[in-house]
Image: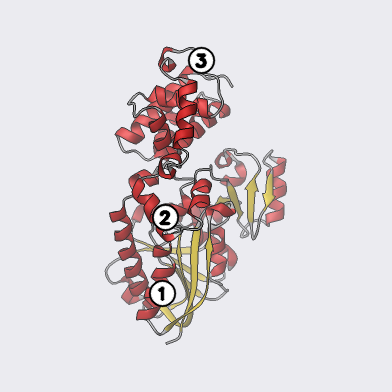
């Protein structure tokens, strides 16, 4: 594969923004791509995929580069790992292929370095997921697939698949309304997306809304709605025949939710959470979704820089927030209503143990079923637990 200097310069620039300016990878990549509108699809894909791969493998690349501050040296190591021939540039003069190959062999037994995660995270993951930690780490270090959800308010999944194919976008049906792209493409530019015929939503995430068992003519609250992916799915599942209320603490996320709902033709009411919101909605919901803030360890495939921004202290803080939401927001559910607690984490400490603690303190709720989805199964890691209020 031929390597172009302007594209490698862009990757180096993005890495500097991520590591030295603490930018999020997606935002740093987006900025560079906007600065270079004349690049073709192949160039844009090279820059984005190379950057994400390097962020994903940052600790290993840094070790192989002898902890050098020279980003070009790290980039040269990355190209060697990919099997590329290095161009005869002065920036790659210090990159020794045989030395790199020997170091890789030496590091294979150092899991945290070889899998490029912080030591504390390796210790925590092994402690909580001992028998499956190795395979989950390997899975999390692979690029995320692109999965679409057909918006059944406007089109059937089969019809969408046919229209996508006519537009040159091949997909494979997974489950529910999920379509897996056979080849990564910029689907945001598709007229079908602009018409609101589909959303981009991972296959695991698409299992949460059906798990809530939403029905028509119900009052359904998505209490941690964010930008509304699951609220949109609930509206589609009930064919706009239920009242869906999306709550969040961030106004900008609700603004994005409104924009998406208009495009999708979804009837969703949104409300910013205030100090009296939960009290006002006491025992009103037939269904309640609590997709709580979490470590995001199940979605490192698509957010690889998150592992460098996390800390053990942050995860402990998140656990307190999760339990607070469970204890307080559950009051919005009617007697006989169903509630789903969900995270995109794979740690039992954020999942099963949180549910157990909640149920011990709230004997008027009962456990019905739960589901843990792991990255090694092919898509994002998720956890969801269905509970019922009995009194």
Check whether the beta carbons of the residues at disc 2 and disc 3 lie within 8 A of each other. no
Where in the figure is residue 73, as x and y percent of width and height?
40, 23
Q: Which of 299 and 142 is in front in this view?
A: 142
Q: How crowded is mark 2: few (under 14 residues within 10 Å), some or many (20 or more)?
A: many
Q: Residue at x 31, y 76 (%)?
A: 279
Q: Residue at x 66, y 42 (%)?
A: 182
Q: Residue at x 47, y 37 (%)?
A: 52
> Which residue, given by chain and number where applicable, does mark 3 sit on?
87
> Which residue, given by chain and number where applicable, does mark 1 sit on?
356
- Is 82 above or below relative to 295? above
Q: Quadrant of residue 185?
A: top right
Task: In the rendered structure, find residue 125 and report the number of the disc placed on it.
Answer: 2
Callout 2 secondary element = helix
- Is 48 above or below relative to 351? above
Query: CA gap, disc 2 to disc 3?
Result: 39 Å
- Select label 2 or label 1 by which is in front: 2
- Is 131 above or below relative to 54? below
Where in the figure is residue 227, as x and y percent of width and height?
44, 55
Left or right: residue 357 compared with residue 172 = left
Where in the figure is residue 384, as x and y percent of width and height?
49, 66
Check whether the beta carbons of the residues at disc 1 and disc 3 lie within 8 A of each other. no
């Amino acid at each position: 594969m031929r390597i172009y200097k302007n594209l490698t310069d862009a990757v180096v620039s993005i890495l500097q923004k991520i590591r030295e300016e603490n930018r999020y990878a997606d935002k740093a990549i987006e900025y560079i791509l906007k600065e270079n509108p004349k690049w073709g699809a192949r160039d844009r894909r090279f820059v984005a995929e190379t950057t994400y791969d390097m962020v994903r493998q940052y600790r290993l690349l840094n070790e192989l580069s002898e902890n050098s501050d020279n980003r070009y040296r790290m980039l040269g190591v990355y190209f060697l790992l990919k099997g590329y021939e290095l161009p005869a540039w002065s920036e790659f003069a210090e990159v020794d292929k045989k030395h790199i190959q020997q170091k890789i062999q030496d590091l294979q037994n150092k899991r945290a370095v070889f899998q490029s995660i912080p030591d504390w995270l390796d210790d925590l993951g092994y402690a909580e997921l001992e028998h499956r930690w190795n395979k989950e780490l390997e899975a999390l270090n692979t690029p995320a697939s692109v999965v679409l959800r057909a918006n059944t308010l406007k089109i059937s999944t089969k019809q969408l698949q046919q229209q996508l194919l006519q537009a040159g976008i091949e997909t494979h049906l997974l489950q529910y309304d999920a379509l897996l792209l056979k080849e990564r493409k910029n689907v945001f530019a598709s007229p079908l997306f602009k018409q609101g015929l589909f959303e981009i939503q991972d296959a695991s995430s698409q299992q949460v809304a059906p798990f809530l068992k939403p029905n028509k003519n119900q009052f359904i609250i998505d209490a941690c709605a964010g930008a509304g992916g699951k609220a949109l799915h609930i509206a589609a599942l009930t064919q706009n025949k239920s009242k869906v209320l999306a709550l969040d603490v961030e106004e900008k996320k609700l603004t994005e939710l409104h924009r998406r709902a208009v495009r999708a033709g979804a009837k969703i009411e949104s409300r910013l959470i205030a100090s009296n919101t939960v009290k006002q909605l006491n025992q009103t919901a037939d269904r309640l979704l609590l997709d709580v803030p979490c470590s995001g360890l199940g979605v490192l495939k698509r957010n690889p820089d998150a592992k460098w921004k996390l800390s053990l202290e942050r995860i402990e803080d998140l656990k307190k927030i999760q339990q607070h939401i469970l204890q307080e927001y559950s009051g919005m559910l009617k007697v006989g209503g169903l509630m789903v607690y969900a995270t995109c984490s794979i740690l039992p400490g954020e999942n099963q143990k949180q549910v157990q603690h909640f149920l011990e303190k709230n004997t008027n709720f009962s456990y019905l079923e739960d589901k843990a989805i792991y990255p090694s199964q092919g898509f994002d890691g998720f956890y969801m637990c269905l509970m019922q209020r009995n009194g």
